[in-house]
Image (cartoon, helix red, strand yellow):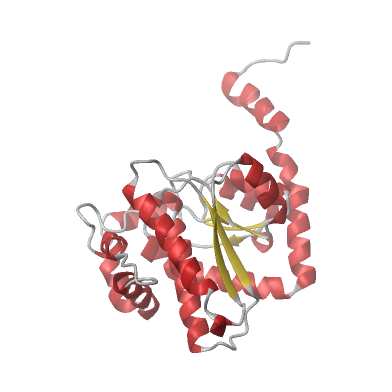
Amino acid sequence: MQVKRLHEYKRQLLNALQILDLYNRLKENPDLDITPRVFVFGAKAASSYHMAKLVIRLIYMIGELVNKDKSLKGKLKVVFLENYRVSLAEIIMPATEISQQISIAGKEASGTGNMKFMLNGAVTIGTMDGANVEIHERVGDENIFIFGLLADEVERLYKHYLPSEYYTSDQRIKRVIDMLRAGINSVSFAEIADSLILGGGGIADPYMVLADFASYCDAQERVDRAYKDKYRFMRMSLVNIAKAGFFAADRSVKEYADRIWRIEPVK
């Protein structure tokens, strides 16, 4: 599940590219031993945010491609929920098993949604960004799936980042980017491909989707292996629920009062 505002730094695009890679693997080997997956998205884009709208269209078209392909034997589905809102979140969050919090490290983009998922027993796959860092501190390495560059690594790499090198050196990346250019369900997404490789009038791949791609795919494979062990995965879920108490509003407000506002409670 990845439900949040559609923005490039939240990297719904990274999720979409990984789905295309998984689709390619299943097409090559329909008997691939994976746990059947349903990838669910919910998001709204600002009315003038052209790239965000393109990403929504891409995810929808991936769903059209994947969901109608019977050769996948029901192992992969993609759903983009219409009109994501609070009443929909009330249904989604208790149903979620994997919470996707995959924003680029250092943007502080993983805020309160990840805590709501955690409280409802979802296990997080995410970068060391925002509240993911605090969730990781609470649950430990064994109860969360961390991947990707750290904030200081992002800062160092950004000065000389060349996403085209990932395109030429990683065949999986090249293949999914070429799919965007050729078209998904006869709809070309060359503009998205150009934004990742050429820059399209700005900096190419400013949120380092390609830099984190391999690490993200590896983390998704770790998710698959963990889920196959039902006892292990249910324990991970319970640990997340048990450790969610740290994020209670009372504790947070008291910490603000003590450390920032430096005020005493009224007796």
Instruction: Give x and y (percent) for residue 183.
Output: 33, 71
246 vs 123: above or below: above
Q: Tell me where residue 38 sits by quadrant.
A: bottom right
Q: Quadrant of residue 182?
A: bottom left
Q: Is 236 or 112 nearer to us in this picture?
A: 112
Residue at 65% over, 41% down: 87
Q: Nearer the viewer, residue 126 or 59?
A: 59
* Residue pictured at 78% horizontal, 49% vertical: 242
Q: Residue furthest top?
A: 267
**Picture coordinates of residue 76, whole percent (x, y):** 58, 74
Residue occupying the point 46% across, 80% down? 24
- Which residue appears at 38% of the width and 50% of the height? 52
Q: Quadrant of the N terminus?
A: bottom right
Q: Say whether residue 215 is visible.
A: no
Instruction: Look at the image and tell me in which quarter the C terminus lies.
Output: top right
* Residue 201: % across, % down: 19, 53
- Does 218 appear above or below 136? below
Q: Taking 102 as reference, is 168 above or below it? A: below
Q: Position of residue 142 (x, y in %)?
A: 68, 63
Q: Is residue 65 visible in the rendered structure shown here?
A: yes
Does residue 212 appear to the left or right of 68 in the view shown? Answer: left
Q: How many marks?
A: 0
113, 266: nearer the viewer:
113
